[in-house]
Image (cartoon, rainbow, N blue to C red):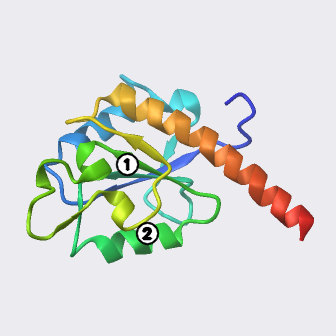
Amino acid sequence: MSNVSKSPWVIHYDGSSCNGCDIEVLAALSPLYDAERFGVVNTGNPKHADILLVTGAVNAQNTEVLREIYDQMIEPKVVVACGICACSGGIFRDCYNVIGGVDQAIPVDVYAPGCAIRPETIIDAVVEGIGVLEEKRAKLAEARKGA
């Protein structure tokens, strides 16, 4: 991570959840856990974001919204599924309108399970996501160089 060329900007999207993981995402971004020490900047604009943090399960109503946010992000981009509901549907898995975890709608790069996910786990997942982002950046630069 010492070769990170830019601070990663994250955007957070809440699918259908109990909001426990959302509170923990906010805690991870607070001064107590200080995700900014890794250069993490929170944004509300998908066009500025490098990492998409998703909490909650995916259902029939939010699938297209999630895809639209993902599609608005510029390549390279990383998706982190935060919490067991985002990873697999969690306790809402058997609900009539839940189709499962985030990977049922968009590609996921990092899975961070927990109920509710701990802020330390979120920070670890973001740091892992930064590594994936750098790998994707290198591959994209190589592809552009070869083209």
Residue 97 lies, in percent from the top left, at: 13, 70
The image shows residue 62, relative to residue 86, as above or below, that is below
Badge 1 element = strand
Residue 82 x/y as whole percent: 34, 44
Classify the position of the N terminus by image quarter: top right
Identify the amino acid type marked 1.
Answer: Ala
Query: Label 1: few (<14), some or many (≥20) within 10 Å?
Result: many
Q: Is residue 2 above or below residue 111?
A: above
Write the residue at 16% across / 56% down: 93
| Amino acid beneath label 2 | Ile
Q: Which residue is mark 1?
A: 81
Residue position for label 2: 69
Image: 74 above or below 142: below
Q: Secondary structure at mark 2?
A: helix
Rendering quarter of residue 100 = bottom left
Separation of marks 2 and 1 at Cα, in angstroms: 14 Å
Indicate the position of residue 77 as horizontal and vertical percent values.
58, 57
Q: Is residue 129 left or right of residue 102?
A: right
Furthest toward the front, the residue is: 94
Q: Is residue 106 above or below residue 113?
A: below
One can see residue 58 in this view: yes
